[in-house]
Amino acid sequence: APGVDMPEVYRRLGEAFLHLEEEVKKGRIAMYGVSAAFVPLRPTDPEHLDLAQVVKQLPADHHFRVLQFPVNFAEAESLWVGHTPRHPDGTAVDPSQVL
């Protein structure tokens, strides 16, 4: 988000997840997720979010179930960018440790 530092972005995601958990408790929704357009982006891209950091914002016993990968003419990165999560040093993250 332009003008917002990354810790604040992740904090806001955490607040949104808590709100969505309240909606689950009220029976208004059964589950929730995020559009993962940020996942195929390179870590150097200003719109990149680290999926592992997103997941760390989830409360215990969460109802997060969905990752949407938009594929269209404007967001085609999912078709050609590798999907292996990477540490800042470029080494691959064990996928079982991400979700």
Image (spheres, helix red, strand yellow):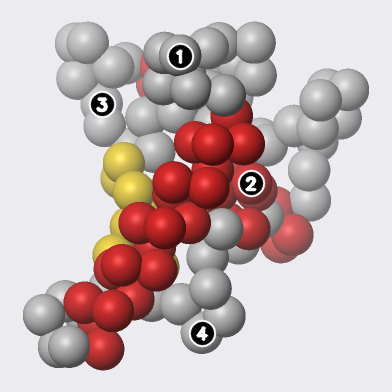
Mark 1 or mark 2: whose residue is earlier in sequence? 1
User: Earlier along the polypeptide chain: callout 3 or callout 4?
Assistant: 4
For the residues labelled 2 and 3, the Cα–Cα distance comes to 23 Å
Q: Which element is circle 1 on?
A: loop
Residue for badge 1:
3
Q: Residue at x 28, y 79 (%)?
A: 22
Which residue is tagged 2? 53
Relative to residue 2, is residue 8 drawn left or right? right
> Is residue 55 toward the left or the right of residue 67 in the image?
right
Q: Position of residue 41 (x, y in %)?
A: 52, 19
Spatial CA span between label 2 and label 4: 17 Å
Name the quarter where the N terminus is drawn: top left
Q: Nearer the viewer, mark 3 or mark 4?
A: 4
Marks 1 and 4 sit apart, C-alpha to C-alpha, by 32 Å
Q: Up-down: is 76 above or below 96?
A: above
Q: Is residue 18 above or below residue 36?
A: below
Amino acid at circle 4: Asp
Give the residue pinned by disc 4.
Answer: 61
Instruction: Please say whether residue 96 is visible from this viewpoint.
Output: yes
Q: Earlier in the sequence, mark 2 or mark 4?
A: 2
Disc 1 vs disc 2: Cβ atoms closer than 8 Å? no
Q: CA distance from mark 1 to mark 3?
A: 27 Å
Q: How many marks?
A: 4
Label 3: how many Cα within 10 Å (few below 14, some 14–19, many 20+): few
State the residue in front, 31 or 4: 4
